[in-house]
Amino acid sequence: MRRLLLIPALLAALWCAPASAQSRSQLGPLCTKDTTPADQMVDACTKIIALKVFKGDQLATVYFWRAVGWNKKGDYARVIADTTEALRLQPSQAVYNMRGSAYYDKGEYDIAIADFNDALKLGPPSGIIFHNRGNAWLAKAEYGKAIADYDVAIKADPTSAFSFQNRGISKEALGDLDGALADINQAIRLDPTLPQPLINRTAIWRARGDLDRAIADGSEAIRLARDKPPVNTMTPPNSVLISGYVHRALAYEAKGDYAHARDDYKATLSVVASDAGSKANQATAKVRLSLVTDASPPAPRDAPSPAPQPASPATQQTGATPAPSPAPAVRGTRMALVIGNGAYAHVKALPNPPHDARAVAKSLRDIGFTVSEGVDLDRAAMQKRTRDFLREAARAQVALVYYAGHGVQVDGRNYLIPVDVELKAGSSMTEAMIDMDTIMAGLDDQVRTNILIFDACRNNPMAHQVAAAGANRAIEGASGLAAPTSLGAGATLGAGTLIAFATAPGQVALDGDGANSPFSAALSRHIGTPGLEVQQMLTRVRAEVVSATKNKQVPWSNSSLLGEVYLAEK
């Protein structure tokens, strides 16, 4: 996503102050010329600062330009340090805009917006700053506010291809594919040499199921990014190329062309990433690459899926042959992965998760989901079922994951626990578990809605074993699960993700005295209610759990969904 640079008016007298001949004839132009290579720019500005001949607004200008050099290198911490010093010397719109943009690239969007607000207060109104603030709103999934800022930016400069592009992205996120396509097409007409609008149109074609057009646009975007890398200092290095590769890879994968998808995912990982969005794309590429490696291509997109059959208890037990995975999904399919682990061999067994999983799986099948169901899975079976689901979800419109069983947080990351896990001091603890972040990265795609529900915070002795296993390795184990950090931190923008926990982060949930946990009992009752929006459904679940547990357990959720999502049709 392109940020725009606001260049301050350089004082004509800047290089008239007493200084060495070298600084006047060489260092000055090297420091303040936008096309100077990053290392030379930083070096020249550093030498000018060392001369100690400039003060006030002149010195602030030098710090600004050194920040431009750091920005070219993707060193946003140093950008922030230099712009902060420049602001101390002489506040200006340009410097606030630069620092806000650096915070944006670090994924600190609220601070970025505060800096853009300060820039606008200094006046005069700037379409560039409205554009950049729109980017921050867009990253925060505040799409209405983003569109409002892009409207102002476009009014100020109707030739701004990037403002049209980003307004189109915002409209796409809100489901207005026609409005999005009109804005993206306008961006391409304004500047056909830009790869970014083509990447965004790639996503629109994928959302419409037109994979050949998606691949064609992705290929042209990659060619442009290779042949004409962005020279604007506010574009994070390599971000466009990384985005082009991952979007084309997702199109190839959805089409069933795993060979080309693998090539593109590898290419995504081979490029150095500096900004939060690129790192999120690479996290997705890493997971998707592992899924398509040595995998058989799926059935054709128009092949019908057979009616799903519930797995029998005999085929769901640890060590037995797992139930068959559902056939490859057709675009538009709603898919679910449901796992309930209770028969733990080395930690406290839980009686309810298998019942919870079966109840939720039945409710989902009743409302039209294709369900992959597993009960009491060991690590190998749980990993295979999860990977199979993530692979097929590439072609689904809605993906839902439900897990009941033991779960822990280690060093702030969440892990789901197979039934054969055995935690011992000095062992490679996390390798025996399933990383929740891996599931989230594998599902990160702007053309799909994701619902993740975890009843995995049961009160049990595992925290003590986590602590013992990590006692000599500086590992921190904590109660309950940690609040996910990837939402709103640079992950791919799109249809949105909702994450629900049976209880608040860091707290423990109850397994219950009946056949089901309080959370899963309420969930299975309400999830199939016709015409009930998913967040309203979770509100009903929350109220029921709070009442049933006498305020001991309060379910928690975090959402980046873009509007209303109904699991059961009205």
Image (cartoon, rainbow, N blue to C red):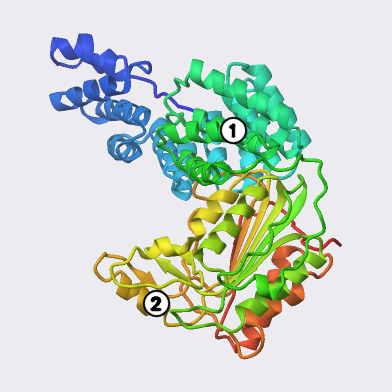
Q: Amino acid at mark 1?
A: Ala
Identify the residue at horizontal 50%, vertical 28% (top origin): 241
Identify the residue at horizontal 66%, vertical 70% (top origin): 315
- Residue 238 at what x, y percent from top left? 45, 29
Q: Which mark is residue 259?
A: 1
Cβ–Cβ under 8 Å for marks 1 and 2: no
Give SS at disc 2. helix
Q: Amino acid at mark 2?
A: Ala
Please identify the residue farthest to the right as the structure is shown: 570
Give SS at disc 1. helix
Could you classify mark 1 by the number of other residues whose Cα lies within 10 Å: few (under 14), some (14-19), or many (20 or more)? some
Q: Which mark is residue 463?
A: 2
Q: CA distance from mark 1 to mark 2?
A: 43 Å
For the residue pair 544 and 7, the one nearer the viewer reads as 544
For the residue pair 194 and 293, the one nearer the viewer reads as 293
Could you classify mark 2 by the number of other residues whose Cα lies within 10 Å: few (under 14), some (14-19), or many (20 or more)? some
For the residue pair 117 and 451, the one nearer the viewer reads as 451
For the residue pair 312 and 382, the one nearer the viewer reads as 312
Which sits earlier in the primary sequence, circle 1 or circle 2? Answer: 1
- Residue 220 at what x, y percent from top left? 61, 20
Residue 160 makes an appearance in the image: no
Q: Is residue 102 above or below residue 20?
A: below
> Position of 121 compared to 352: left or right?
left
